[in-house]
Image (cartoon, rainbow, N blue to C red):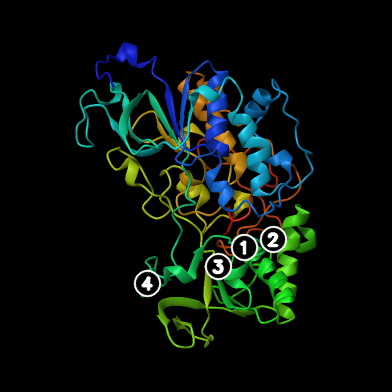
Amino acid sequence: MNYAWTAANSSSLPVAIIGAGPVGLAAAAHLLRKGETPLLFEAGDTVGTSVLRWGHVRLFSPWRYMLDKEAVSLLEETEWQAPDAEGYPTGRELVEQYLEPLSQVPALTPHLHLKSRVLAVTRLGYDKMKTPGREEAPFVLRVERASGEEDDVLAKAVIDASGTYLTSNVLGASGIPAVGEWALQRSIFYGIPDVLGKDRARYAGRRVLVVGSGHSAFNALLDLEVLAREVPTTQIFWAIRHSDTGQMYGGGENDALAERGQLGTRIRALVERGHVRLVTNVQIRKLVQTEEGISLVGYEETLPAVDEIIATTGFRPDRALTSELRLALDPAVESPVALAPLIDPNVHSCGTVPPHGVDELSHPESNFYIVGMKSYGRAPTFLMLTGYEQVRSIVAALTGDWESARRVELELPETGVCSVDNGRSCCSAEPEEIPLNLGVRQFAGKGLQVVTPGKCCG
């Protein structure tokens, strides 16, 4: 790498994007449309690698809410066939019918680097402590290639869209692993396993405990119930941390997204019929392997020993690669400070998070932005469309169009909202008014915000 640089020639450097998922690829599309050069790094061997980990799950939002406008405009210049706007894709279909074709667009392909893991981001010649001249220094990304070799790449700005799916929350109720959790890793799956596919043998005829109260848990439980009908010796247990099920099952028939409403309705029926044994107020402190199976310590009701545990407890960001940057992160939510009060799950659910952009996502480290699910820190209320609005605003700012950067362009259907219920459910049958003064950028109208499985209250 050539370390010779000046403030003048650093402006010709590319904008680096970390992560080639839906939001990272959308950022690249917006940069290309603005005449900028993106440099897109993906640790996996294909785009959408994290999405493929839950590729068997069908989204409850239709295709029309899954696509970024600028990405679609690039695809329309090829022979791409748009999917049925009202159809419901699986995660795999999202990758195969949208992300992969987008990655193969001639204008984008040369800028995509697969099997390239970003290990660290810093400023050229500047550690975190050094200040004079810092803003003029380009960023340095330390990249590990497929061969195992490492090299440094310069960029004038960095957009971190690396997500959180690979850093799951733990089972321990206090935010740290339960005693014995790491020792029993072989019996714990973090996320949504493919119960009816490649993971079938792992769960068939076994005693399975699902931990978590969001839509990821719903999907796992529904697949397990199908498996239990086919293999009747399969037993299903479900543990949630709070004692009040309240609106946990969602809005049912009143949900503006029918597929999402059906998830809660079906789960409620399974519990009421005894097909799934629900245990509330479970605060897991310890896991113990006994002759009978895995026993949990730290809950009020006695739960039988189980063979397998599925942890659908959400995700958290990995901050290791940005440890030398000056970031302003909320101490609780771990999102950018200005964004935190807009997404705090103690106050907001998915329907009350306003669209936001560059102002809420900025840090003391100029021209560095965290977007997508990772921008939400530990909050589970991220919305795909909101991620697209984030990168649209940021790219406009990076190219000097501040009027556009601060203008809300995200339009949501006028079909109802999810209510605020302290993060215990994603949706409610009773919509609430949305305040119009939440932050620098105002919420443009009231309406339903669309989520993907496991990305809202999961």
Relative vertical location of residue 78 with respect to residue 126 in this rendering, above or below = above
Q: Earlier in the sequence, mark 1 or mark 3?
A: 3
Check residue 425 in the rendering and tell me which mark sits there, or answer none: 1
> Neighbour class for label 2 at 10 Å: few (<14), some, many (≥20)?
many
Mark 3 to mark 4: distance in Å? 21 Å
**Residue 355 visible in the displayed image:** no
> What type is the residue that disc 1 sits on?
Ser
Q: Name the mark nearer the viewer: 1 or 3.
A: 3
Residue displayed at 39% across by 65% down: 175
Query: Cα distance, mark 1 to mark 2?
Result: 7 Å
Q: Which residue is mark 4?
A: 183
Real-space Cα separation, disc 1 to disc 3, in angstroms: 11 Å
Disc 2 marks which amino acid? Ser
Q: Residues within 10 Å of mark 3 (few under 14, many from 20)?
A: many
Contact check, label 4 and label 1, Cβ < 8 Å: no
The span from disc 2 to disc 4 (Cα, nearest Å) is: 39 Å
